[in-house]
Image (spheres, rainbow, N blue to C red):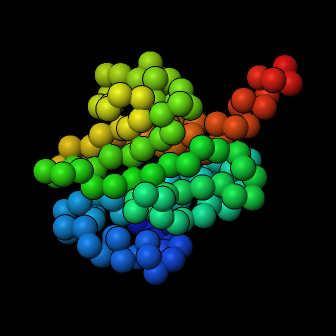
Amino acid sequence: MTGKRAPAFGSPGVAEVFARYPAPQRRQLMALRALIMETAAATEGVGRIEETLKWGQPSYLTPETRSGSTVRIDALKGGGAAMFFHCQSGLVPAFRELYGDALRFEGKRAILFDAGAAVPHEAVRHCVALALTHHLSKSKRRAG
């Protein structure tokens, strides 16, 4: 991470969810949150990110540009964290093809992060960028 101060939470509900996580998972999830925000800001076509709750999980959407698929994060029972994607988007199988040796996955819906393990930033950043521009790339395929 760049060491910048984290942006304010998107809503009091999101702040409350983060406050309820055990400290080790909260740190890991805050790092994932920062990575999502930084990636969104640096990725062309994404626009403003909306932070909200979906299914009680912190979720990141592209409401203005509608460029991407929602990215959700949450703590895992027993420790660690996960980053979730729409299971029918085809994103996680694509991530597995690209980063099967660097990341751990759950089915077609999540990247899993072990408790206390370092997040492979470049791989995860690329996956987040692909998710946040997922609809843009689909539009280009249709147009091309």
In the image, taking residue 41 as reference, residue 97 lies left or right, namely left
**Which residue is more in the foreground, 15 or 88?**
88
Assign the N terminus to one quadrant of the image. bottom left
**Which residue is more in the foreground, 21 or 1?**
21
Residue at position x 48%, y 64% in the image = 53
Q: Position of residue 33 (x, y in %)?
A: 43, 59
Residue at position x 79%, y 28% in the image = 140
> Considering only vertical position in the picture, is 135 above or below 45?
above
Residue at position x 57%, y 40% in the image = 131
Report the label total: 0
> Considering only vertical position in the picture, is 118 above or below 74?
above
Q: Position of residue 144 (x, y in %)?
A: 84, 20
Residue 44 seen in this snapshot: no
In the image, taking residue 25 as reference, residue 64 lies left or right, namely right
**Residue extending furthest front?**
55
**Residue extending furthest right?**
143
Q: Position of residue 34 (x, y in %)?
A: 45, 60
Q: Position of residue 38 (x, y in %)?
A: 53, 57
Residue 76 seen in this snapshot: yes
**Which residue is more in the foreground, 13 or 62?**
13
In the image, taking residue 21 as reference, residue 134 lies left or right, namely right
**Residue extending furthest bottom?**
12
> Considering only vertical position in the picture, is 11 above or below 47?
below
Residue at position x 25%, y 67% in the image = 21
**Which residue is more in the foreground, 13 or 41?**
13
> Considering only vertical position in the picture, is 77 above or below 58?
above
